[in-house]
Structures are given as C-alpha cells and as structure tokens.
C-alpha cells in the first residue's frame, strides 16, 4: 500500500517514469492487484507510452477486454493527465469500435470542452443524454457548456435537471448562479452562489461572482467580505 501511494504521488506529480519503476514489480504477477494495474496503465499513458498503456488496460479485464473497453480506460487516463488530443483519439477509437459503449459520448464531449470545440462537445453530450437520460454528469456538462456559451436559459434547464440527479455538485450551483446573474436575477444568483461557496469554500471563482451579485443587491459589506475570500484563496 505504501508503494502504491508513493507511485500515485510520483505519477500524478509529473514523474511517471519513477512511478512505473515502483509499479512494475507489483504487477508482474498472475494475481496482480487491479488497482495497481490501473495505475500502471495511467503511468504509461502519462509517460507517453500509449501501446503499453492499452496492453495494461486489456490485462485489467483478465483477457476479456474489448478494444473499445481498453481505449475507454486509455482515454480516461489521458484526460486525467490533461493530454486532451490523445484522449480525443482514444475516445474516437472507442466509438468506432463500439458506438453504444456507455459513457463514451459523454467522455468525448468533456474532452471537446477542454479543447474548446464547443459544437462538437454539444453534439456528443446530447448523444450521451439521448442514450441515457439519467446520466447526470452529461446533463451537467451540457448545461455548463451552454452557460459558458451565453445560452443562459437553455443552460439553466439542463442544470436544474442535473441538480436533482447530483445534488451534491457545487459546480452545478455555481453555473446556475452564473446564468441567473447574467440574466439579471441577482437575488436568485446570490442564493445559488451562497450554496456553491458553502459546498466548496476553496473555489475563488464562486466567491468572486457572489461578491458581484451581493454588490448588485446592495449588500456592500458582504460583498467586500466575499472579495476578501477571493484574495485569501489566491494568496
């Protein structure tokens, strides 16, 4: 467990080669820990060794992995490493092999958001929702994307659905607050943004927007206090 923890720290702090050195002895056995195998695949992906990563992800399924399943895990590893172009290629390979694989359209949509390909992202997220209307993450990401694209009313309709599916998501409240603020309903914005900062007091963006909404409502002292949080968090 200590070796796994150290390998995780190395892999996710920009030293995947060192992580690989620790993980290989743990995974060169028939009954290797699946968690160690997954981390090994992530380390290979972060080290730019895509073929080895795909082999590991296939092994993770004990020989029963389809190419689509292996590429799905590869895409997730690339996305987590912020290697978005590589993640795009992996998820495109998933959809070519198995267009109905659960979550593939959603994950590709998230990648397109990161690549600022908003039209493609919207298309993929809508396909994900059509395949699974209860996919709260897809609903949230589509709502947030629409708000970022200044389509506030349309975005709110998705975010309100996402709120019922994943009520513990602070980001849903943030984007709903942003949409209400941009539509000049500052009272609603204040209520939603208060919820966002309560759920995640470490996000300066929520405090900043809350400060603006409070000032618009005439709550100057509270607005100043919120801005102080922004300064403290940035510091």
Image (tube, grey):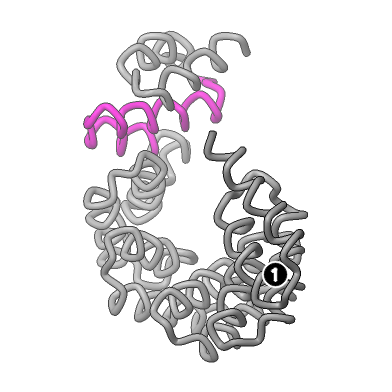
Could you say which is closer to the camera, residue 28 or residue 209? 209
x, y percent for residue 58: 38, 39
Quadrant assignment for the N terminus? top right
Q: Residue at x 39, y 79 (%)?
A: 149
Q: Can you tell which quarter of the image residue 3 is in?
A: top right
Q: Residue at x 51, y 24 (%)?
A: 36
Quadrant assignment for the C terminus? top right
Q: How many marks?
A: 1
The image shows residue 130, relative to residue 116, as above or below, that is: below
- Furthest toward the bottom, the residue is 153
Judge whether residue 49 is colored magenta. Answer: yes
Classified by dominant secondary structure, the portion drawn in magenta counts as: helix
x, y percent for residue 159: 61, 78
Q: Does residue 191 appear to the left or right of 12 in the view shown?
A: right
Q: Does residue 111 appear to the left or right of 225 in the view shown?
A: left
Judge whether residue 70 is colored magenta. Answer: no
**Span colored in magenta:** 30-57
**Residue at which label 1 appears:** 214
Q: Can you tell which quarter of the image residue 35 is in?
A: top right
The image shows residue 23, relative to residue 84, as above or below, that is: above
- Judged from the image, the secondary structure of the residue bearing numbered disc 1 is helix
Give the class, few, some or many, for how many residues have Cα within 10 Å of label 1's Cα (few <14, many ≥20): many
The image shows residue 212, relative to residue 134, as above or below, that is: above
x, y percent for residue 225: 72, 52
Q: Residue at x 70, y 47 (%)?
A: 201
Q: Residue at x 72, y 72 (%)?
A: 190
């Amino acid at each position: 467990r200590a070796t796994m923890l150290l390998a995780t720290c190395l892999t996710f702090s920009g030293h995947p080669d060192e992580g690989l050195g620790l993980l290989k002895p743990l995974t060169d056995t028939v009954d290797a820990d699946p968690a160690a195998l997954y981390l090994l695949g992530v380390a290979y992906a972060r080290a730019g060794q895509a073929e080895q990563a795909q082999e590991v992800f296939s092994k993770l399924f004990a020989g029963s992995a389809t190419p689509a399943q292996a590429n799905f895990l590869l895409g997730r590893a690339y996305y987590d490493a912020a290697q978005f172009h590589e993640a795009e290629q992996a998820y495109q390979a998933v959809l070519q092999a198995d267009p109905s694989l659960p979550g593939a359209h959603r994950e590709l949509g998230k990648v397109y958001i990161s690549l600022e390909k908003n039209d493609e992202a919207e298309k993929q997220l809508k396909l994900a929702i059509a395949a699974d209307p209860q996919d709260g993450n897809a609903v949230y990401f589509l709502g947030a994307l629409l708000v970022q694209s200044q389509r506030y009313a349309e975005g709110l309709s998705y975010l309100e659905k996402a709120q019922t599916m994943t009520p513990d998501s602070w980001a849903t409240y943030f984007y709903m607050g942003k949409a209400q603020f941009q539509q000049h309903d500052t009272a609603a914005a204040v209520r939603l943004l208060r919820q966002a900062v309560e759920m995640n007091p470490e996000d300066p963006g929520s405090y900043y927007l809350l400060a603006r909404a409070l000032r618009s409502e005439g709550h100057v002292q509270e607005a100043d206090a919120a801005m102080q949080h922004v300064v403290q968090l940035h510091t």
